[in-house]
Image (cartoon, rainbow, N blue to C red):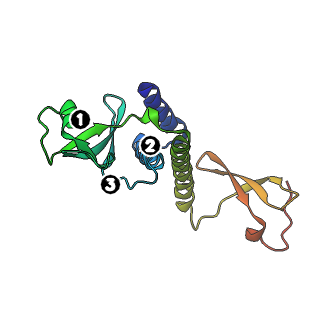
Amino acid sequence: MNAEFFAALEQLEKEKGIPVEYMLDRVCQALLTAYKKDNDGLVCENVYVEPDMEKRAINMYVLKEVVDEAEDPLTEISLEDAREINRTASMGDMVRVSVETKKFGRIAAQAAKQVIIQGIRESERGMVFNEYSSKEHEILSAVVNRIDPRNGNIILDMVSDGEKTEAVLSTSEQVAGEDLRE
């Protein structure tokens, strides 16, 4: 599953130009969001995610303090349980406990999905903004491809530096009295 996941991130980078590191950061945020949803809105200060590109794995851990008897299972772990993870654990130590992301509930998974989709959209918007901000104060030629009869928006095809781009010219951005035709 992890190999397929990383292959999908690389494919996303090839197709849409979204860097793998950016998407990994978004996935880490999504996992933290899912953990928070699954644990009743817990603030995730002791939870962290470690993506490993070489091993093609994403690991999620919770730092828990070793105590005699764990009163808060989200932040504390008993000495017996801590010794199962780390044999040298002693009272007051912090132990990394692995989190199984497969056990997240449906709502947590949906929240994670939304964070990832939002990351893709933000990246796409940023790329479009960067593309057009470099053309600021330039005169561009465009062909009217379609006029939307419902709202009057005009869909334009622009060719710049050999690249064809589609743009929408809303009615508020059009010159008053100008008659454009397809």
Q: Do residues under tags 1 and 2 come within 8 Å of each other at their CB atoms?
A: no
Residue 8 percent across, percent down from the top left:
49, 31
Residue 43 percent across, percent down from the top left:
38, 56
| Residue at (60, 64) in percent of width and height | 138
Between residue 64 and residue 164, name the one nearer to us.
Answer: 64
Mark 2 or mark 3: which is in front? Answer: 3
Mark identifier at residue 172: none
Which numbered disc flags the more N-terminal residue, 1 or 2?
2
The amino acid type, in three-letter code, at marker 1 is Asp
The amino acid type, in three-letter code, at marker 3 is Glu
Local SS, label 3: loop
| Residue at (44, 50) in percent of width and height | 36
> 10 Å neighbourhood of mark 1: few (<14), some, or many (≥20)?
some
The residue that disc 3 covers is 45
Mark identifier at residue 27: 2
Between residue 17 and residue 45, name the one nearer to us.
Answer: 45
Mark 1 or mark 2: which is in front? Answer: 1
Between residue 52 and residue 111, name the one nearer to us.
Answer: 111
Spatial CA span between label 1 and label 2 = 29 Å
| Residue at (39, 43) in percent of width and height | 21
Which numbered disc flags the more N-terminal residue, 2 or 3?
2
> 10 Å neighbourhood of mark 2: few (<14), some, or many (≥20)?
many
Between residue 155 and residue 182, name the one nearer to us.
Answer: 155
The residue that disc 1 covers is 81
Q: Quadrant of residue 149?
A: bottom right
